[in-house]
Amino acid sequence: MLRLTAGGLVFLARLEAAAAPRTCAAVTRLLLPLEAKLLQSRWSGEAAWVPLGDRDIGVGRDPENGTRFPAPGQLLLYPGGLSETEILLPYGSTSFGSKLGPLAGSHFATIVEGAEQLPELGRRVLWQGAQDFRLEAIPG
């Protein structure tokens, strides 16, 4: 399990280890805990993103458990290529993309507690700007 804190709101997420084993292993090994800023997506609709720059997390460029249309609360990891490495956090209707066109990301975690707060998180990111973001593993 993961604890995601964003904009002062707390969410619990289940790793999708059966569907995205390489991505989940890389996230837990290389990115946790992750402290960053959560920004409003420019190209993907009702979603926020955590830019990770040119970081190579070692999972290759083909998405594992890939999707372009994640549901609210389905966290995606985009390992870089057409756009920079990033985590996408949909809070509403989302079509993942960049200024170069559509992207597919690896669905690696799903929010299982706190999903009712996603619209408020979206409001904060959209109207208040960048929000503090922390992603960490929960022991046990």
Image (cartoon, grey):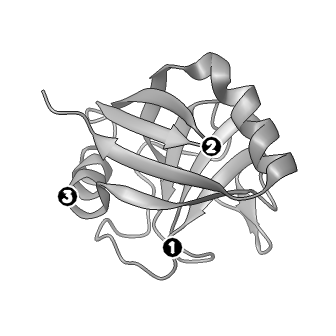
Identify the amino acid type marked 1: Gly
Badge 2 marks a residue whose secondary structure is: loop
Query: Dot 1, how many residues are within 10 Å of its Cα: few (below 14), some (14-19), or many (20+)?
Result: many
- Where residue 119 appears, x then y in whole percent? 75, 28
Q: Earlier in the sequence, mark 2 or mark 3?
A: 2
Query: Dot 3, how many residues are within 10 Å of its Cα: few (below 14), some (14-19), or many (20+)?
Result: few
Identify the amino acid type marked 3: Arg
Q: Which mark is residue 7?
A: 2
Vertical side of 46 occupied by 84: above or below: below
Residue at 32%, 52% in the rendered image: 23
**Pointer 3 residue:** 29
Residue contact between numbered discs 2 and 1, judged by CB atoms under 8 Å = no
Q: How many marks?
A: 3
Q: Quadrant of residue 43?
A: bottom right
Residue 110 seen anywhere in this rendered image of the structure:
yes
Badge 3 marks a residue whose secondary structure is: helix
Whole-number angstrom distance, CA of label 2 to CA of label 3: 24 Å
Whole-number angstrom distance, CA of label 1 to CA of label 3: 18 Å
Badge 1 marks a residue whose secondary structure is: loop
Residue at 65%, 17% in the rendered image: 116
